[in-house]
Image (spheres, rainbow, N blue to C red):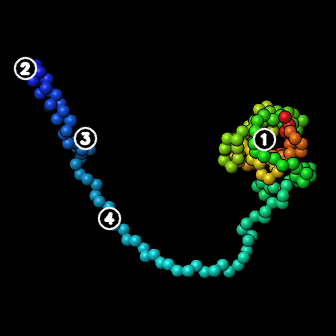
């Protein structure tokens, strides 16, 4: 019977020991509190009517692109790209997803395009490519134009849909680029 009372007593002592008051000052030995913050003055608030705009200058806004020749980065397609832009077929982002065979400057390689967001475009990449296309990290559709971008989001190449499973264009350095399936 004594054992039962001893065990019960020990249980009560242990339970009550969990009810002790502790604070952070018990651990650091420093029981001083930080000084309260001082109130700061608040400036007065005024109200009134705004002046009417004096000019209708819209030069701060870029010009809207002409249908079928959307520009990216302020660069208009030139030369053969201008003709491709004029005759370009409609393109959707979803139709671009997947594996493409790339012809670039006399060599060929593979390109993979996904719908995974990456910055202002979608994730993409190349395998076995040379030159500028080795830096490709993303892509986007802008109007009838497909823009291939580097890992920092800068345009590398611009392509236009010229047939059902074919895109033609050029890199920034003027090298011709074609995608096909």
Query: Which residue is depicted at the point 84% across and 49% down?
Result: 90
Pointer 1 residue: 96
Nearest to N terminus: mark 2 or mark 4: 2
Query: Which residue is depicted at the point 75% across and 47% down?
Result: 140
Pointer 3 residue: 27
Residue 65 drawn at (x, y percent) = 81, 60
- Looking at the image, is mark 3 or mark 2 nearer the viewer? 2
Pointer 4 residue: 38
Nearest to N terminus: mark 1 or mark 3: 3
Residue 81 drawn at (x, y percent) = 89, 50
How far apart marks 2 and 4 lie (CA) works out to 62 Å
How far apart marks 4 and 1 lie (CA) works out to 61 Å
Res 54 → quadrant: bottom right
- Depth order, front residue of 9/43: 9
Res 94 → quadrant: top right
> Badge 1, how many Cα within 10 Å: few under 14, some, many 20+?
some
Secondary structure found at label 3 = helix
Nearest to N terminus: mark 4 or mark 3: 3
Nearest to N terminus: mark 2 or mark 1: 2
Pointer 2 residue: 2
């Amino acid at each position: 019977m004594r054992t039962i009372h001893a065990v019960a007593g020990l249980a009560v002592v242990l339970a009550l020991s969990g009810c002790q008051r502790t604070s952070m000052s018990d651990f650091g030995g420093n029981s001083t509190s930080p000084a309260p913050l001082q109130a700061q003055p608040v400036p007065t608030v005024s109200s009134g009517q705004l002046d009417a705009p004096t000019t209708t200058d819209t030069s701060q806004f870029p010009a809207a692109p002409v249908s079928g020749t959307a520009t990216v980065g302020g660069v208009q397609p030139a030369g053969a790209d201008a003709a491709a832009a004029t005759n370009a077929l409609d393109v959707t982002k979803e139709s671009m997803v997947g594996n493409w065979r790339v012809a670039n400057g006399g060599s060929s390689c593979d390109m993979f395009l996904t719908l995974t967001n990456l910055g202002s475009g979608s994730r993409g990449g190349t395998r076995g490519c040379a030159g500028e296309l080795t830096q490709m990290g993303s892509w986007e559709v802008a109007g009838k134009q497909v823009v291939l971008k580097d890992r920092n989001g800068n345009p590398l190449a611009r392509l236009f849909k010229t047939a059902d499973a074919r895109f033609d264009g050029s890199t920034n350095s003027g090298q011709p680029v074609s995608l096909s399936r």
